[in-house]
Amino acid sequence: MLSIPKYEFWFVSGSQHLYGEETLKEVAENSKKIVAGLNEKGNLPYKIVFKEVLTTADEITKFMKEANYNDNVAGVITWMHTFSPAKNWIRGTQLLQKPLLHFATQYLDYIPYDTMDFDYMNLNQSAHGDREYGYINARLQKHNKVIYGHWQDSEVQRQIADWEDVAVAYDESFKTKICRFGDNMRSVAVTEGDKIQAQIQLGWTVDYYGIGDLVAEMNKVKESEIDDQYVDLESKYIMVQGNQSKEEFQATVRYQLKQYIAMKKFLERGGYTAFTSNFEDLHGMEQLQGLSAQLLMRDGYGFAGEGDWKTAGLLRIFKIMTHNTKTAFMEDYTLDLRPGHEAILGSHMLEVDPSIASEKPRVEVHPLDIGGKADPARLVFSGDEGDAIDVTLADFRDNFKLVTYPVDAHKAEKDTPNLPVAKQMWTPKPGLKNGATKWIEAGGGHHTVMSFAATEEQVRDLATLYGVELCDIN
Ligand code: MN
């Protein structure tokens, strides 16, 4: 299953010595209360740890170095309760190599007209303290996240939670290893890219293995291991034997389970968390990876077909960001262009992630009119309804580009009895004609990540952290 280390975020408050020890103590006390409140009631995926009140350039620099050095720290959150002269932040901010959230908040969410005095004004200066501090981040082109609003506000808390998930995905991005079983589909352009630049900018290691290495691993799988997986499969999904004999059906499904077990072992041994397959590259294999790829996506692995390592890596990052919730490899397949019906039917020949299923998936065996191999087993289901986003990563040599739009996901108007694959319908929120035109103009590819759990704001934040170009069609 998807496993994410126990990350935490370090919280510091900025101040200075002008106000005296009593005020600094209050700054620390209020900061602790905010952090405790966020941890208890903020629905945050990762814990925030209050570290200290920082008042000098040396303290700030030392703190940032420590945040860099600690592997369990996924990012730093700063708040200026009082005024903290921002020249003090220059060196430390330059050194910080982790995501930075400037939380522009105030201890109280109101103005205490009846009781406020000069002590209150000394302590509660975030309205201008956060601007002094924000200036230096902008001047340093830190491209940090700014969240503004009261710390008890549910929308603010949701923003912090979403940003934490992006920051963790970013940190995990630099540990992401993508295994390519075979090369890219011949002659295809958009699935290609600069693997060295991907490692520099996105942190991804992208390695090739000949399909023979996987076949050798498959030959080592024991029948008893397949038996166990078959029982597990029957307990989770509906087995549909169809026109096949019982023996044929079981043998076909078992072959996919053998692929699943072998790929999982291979990936685990190499530390890979994403992979690709290619129907042109199956020498020594009887079936294209269908059900087997779907089960690995269910488990949290990134995947894309036709050797598309960019989408495989992107899916893994989004699965980390969404805790493997309703986030899938997708491909635009066929269109309804009639006025009032405008929609895209998305699918793949086989490999659609069951995390977006709106019903219990069915295990079925059918021919695949491509690749010239045996009929593969696959999970068949309809996708879900609701707000989602679609996003793709393209390589433009001088930079990568994330292309995205929000979509309205929905059910198909009718069943497709002759198309036994998993499918998802959606309409881009900017309209099919407008949205798809802009997508094509931007050079966005046909392989995408569709997520019901990630937000456009998260895609923007991720693009900022990576330093990639963003085309947000909305
Ligand atoms: Mn494809």
Image: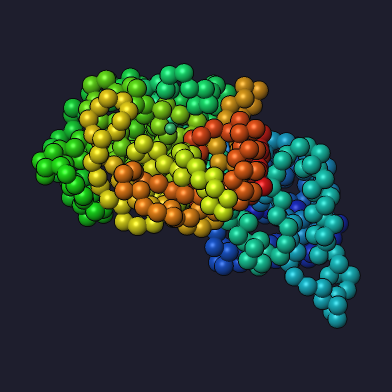
Q: Percent from the top left, x then y, of residue 434?
A: 65, 43
Q: Percent from the top left, x then y, of residue 280?
A: 34, 22
In the visual, does 403 lie left or right of 292?
right
**In this orientation, which residue lies closer to the viewer: 278 or 172?**
278
Residue lying furthest front in this view?
338
Residue lying furthest right in this view?
118
- Residue 30 quadrant: bottom right
In the visual, does 276 lie left or right of 161?
left
Q: Residue at x 15, y 42 (%)?
A: 244
In the visual, does 81 lie left or right of 471?
right
- Residue 136 seen anywhere in this rendered image of the structure: yes
Tell me which colouring the rendered structure shows: rainbow
Q: Percent from the top left, x then y, of residue 301?
A: 39, 40
**In this orientation, which residue lies closer to the viewer: 374 or 211?**
374
Ligand 1: which quarter?
Answer: top left
- Residue 28 quadrant: bottom right
Q: Determine whether 374 is above or below 64 in the image.
A: above
Q: Residue at x 43, y 53 (%)?
A: 412
Q: Determine whether 360 is above or below 256 in the image.
A: below
**Number of marks:** 0
Q: Percent from the top left, x then y, of residue 447?
A: 49, 35
Q: Residue at x 82, y 45 (%)?
A: 135
- Residue 224 seen anywhere in this rendered image of the structure: no
Q: Residue at x 36, y 36 (%)?
A: 349
